[in-house]
Image (spheres, coloured by chain):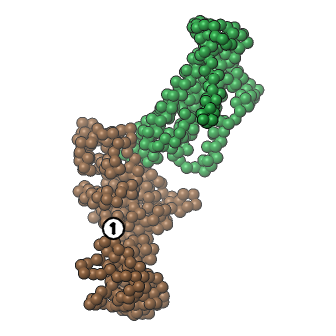
Chain colours: A green, B brown
Amino acid sequence: MSLRVYVIAYLIFLYAPIALLPVFAFNDGTIIAFPLSGFTTQWFTELTQNAALHAAVRNSLVIAACTAVFATILGLCAARAGAMSDFRGKKGITGFIMLPLVLPEIIVAVSLLVVLRQVLGLSLGNWTIIMAHVLICTPFSIAILNGAFAALDPAMEEAALDLGESRWSAFRLVTLPLVMPGIVSSMLIAFTISLDEFIIAFFLTGANPTMPVYIWGLLRFPSSLPVIMALGTILVALSILLLTIAEIFRRRGVRRAGGTDTGGFL
Amino acid sequence: MTDLITLRGVQKYYGDYHALRDINLTIREGEFFSLLGPSGCGKTTLLRVIAGFEGVSGGTVMISGRDMSDVPPNKRPTNMVFQSYAIFPHLTVGQNVAFGLRTRRDIAKSQHAALVKEALHLVGLDGYENRASHAMSGGQRQRVALARALILKPKVLLLDEPLSALDKKMREHMQVELIRLQRHIGITFILVTHDQEEALVMSDRIAVMFAGEIGQLDDPETLYRRPNSRRVAEFIGKMNFLPAQVTGIDGAVTLDIAGFGVTQVPHVQVPEGAVIGPAAVGIRPETLAILFEGETASRHETTATVDEVVYYGDMTYYDVRVKDVPEPLTIAMKNLIGRPVLEVGAQTRIGWDERAIVVF
């Protein structure tokens, strides 16, 4: 009995703030407080008319898409090297690559800002954010793709080689299709992380803010809070959708490679 | 038979680890050749050197008279059946078998279907073209792997422990089928195995490997009857060892065997360069005999006490103690009609034959 109470309290603690998002997104009133004053879709309508927000969302989508592609390519190379070849210092290097996973983002953000502005004297823009996001997303990509490669029999590629294919075509014809679900999963995760990342984007953004930075800017105007709630609702729905798709692909990959599932992010 | 594969002074290092030590070996066209040895002896490494998956640190690999040492696996006339079979799970059985045809420009696309059909027929999987490969059983996957490797008509088929994942019944069945297949298509098979019985059953010749070296290379019968060293004798079948003294080497070799007495054996049973002094004598369990009531030894006999009895149905294995022999001797007896099974502690006579003796 007490265990059931604990579980319910735990779930409320985890999800109550998120559950409140859609509640106030559809509430007819500018003040975020109970009691609710009525149902409206006004805030969603306002979302569609805000040109500055659209620019920020577009920015974020471009950054997230580029990050997903680059992080996954880097992750693919690292995971393949880790799975298929043995070299001196492999363990140490793998650990070193995964380090950004636990580095505080604020530290990464500040040091990147210093390097880019003070040391290299470059101007900030979307591409600086993409670089930083690739940095923090690559460990996630490696972790996901490591799983995909671990489930893969190393003899598969050798068999293709043995049957006359070159190294590259053996990779393309056998390894790539077998780890493809992992690649899709990695891209979706990296995309999601990049899309709502704030600290680094806040430090490195140029003239055009990303969506999280824009939302943060809106917070100064209490009257726009319900609009943020509406935007938040959409984002949560989108995140859940993307993560679910990513997990479906990851599980399919494990099955296809003939391994047993040993867990993942979901 | 002409020579197909010649290895000359092949060396393989992994860092400081010496995996293959000066391997010299000739494998003939059309023979069933086995690399046998305990795990870690280098047999799989040697197979992978022949396939081209591992480069050599020294020496040359010749196939059909061509130096292949630096030729990658996709350019070698060898095909491999992997221990895990490595069936591509995202392709159907037919696509798996046809995989090797992709790069063969000399074979018209229109012939592919017929070749796949022929290869599947060869391994007894007629009509399996459109099956999903990941839904096949272990035995079927192995057949797919065989068909996939054989469709390219390689000069050599390499088999890396192909039967180790199958259960006993299936394994024995596939042993016979592989022999039949090899005789039917007539190409060279090179089998890697740690199972001495499998090697004896299937091979024309066997190379027994220990710690990166070939300990003995012979046909199965010679290997079993005349092992050239104690480690080969211990690895293949069961062998009793008795301490002995070589007391004379003129003409025949005179031996004084602990518990058995003095006898003479011809030089073929003694390693080259034997000298007068202490030696070890090996006797296979089936060449010794328990002498039951009324039976007499064809050559020599001695007395013994039964120490252990293991009943196998068709056979009974006795461990017996003989005076002056430090270790109990194992004797394998067929359970013929009317033959009793002795009890532990029973006194018995045992017969032995000096022609079955190997001296180390």
Q: Amino acid at mark 1?
A: Leu
Dividing the picture into quadrants, the one containing residue B338 is bottom left
Residue B222 location in percent, x, y?
33, 74
**For residue A6, above or below residue B35:** above
Pick the quarter of the image with the C terminus of chain A.
top right
Tally of numbered tags: 1
- Can you say whether A121 is above or below B90 in the image? above
**Quarter-wise, where is residue B43 in the image?**
bottom left
Q: Give the left or right position of residue A186, taking residue B305 as reference.
A: right
Q: Nearer the viewer, residue A260 or B55?
A: A260
User: Where does the image place residue A31, in percent across and percent down from the top left?
Assistant: 69, 9
Q: Is residue B98 above or below residue A86?
A: above
* Left or right of residue A51, residue B46 in this image: left
Residue at label 1?
Answer: B200
Of residue B75 and residue A155, the one placed in the foreground of this image is A155
Which residue is nearer to you in this view: B188 or A6? A6
Quadrant where the N terminus of chain A is found in the figure:
top right
Nearer-the-camera pick, B334 or B231: B334
Residue at x 45%, y 51% (from the top left corner): B53
* Label 1 CA crowd tier, 10 Å (few <14, some 14–19, many 20+): many
Residue found 36% across the figure and 59% down from its top:
B191
Element on which disc 1 rests: helix
Residue at (44% x, 90% y) in the render: B323
Question: What residue occupies the far front of the structure in this picture?
Answer: A1
Q: Chain of mark 1?
A: B
Residue A57 in view: no
Please tell me in which quadrant of the rendered image residue B280 appears.
Answer: bottom left
A139 with respect to B268 (left or right): right
* Image location of residue B272, percent across then percent down: 41, 82
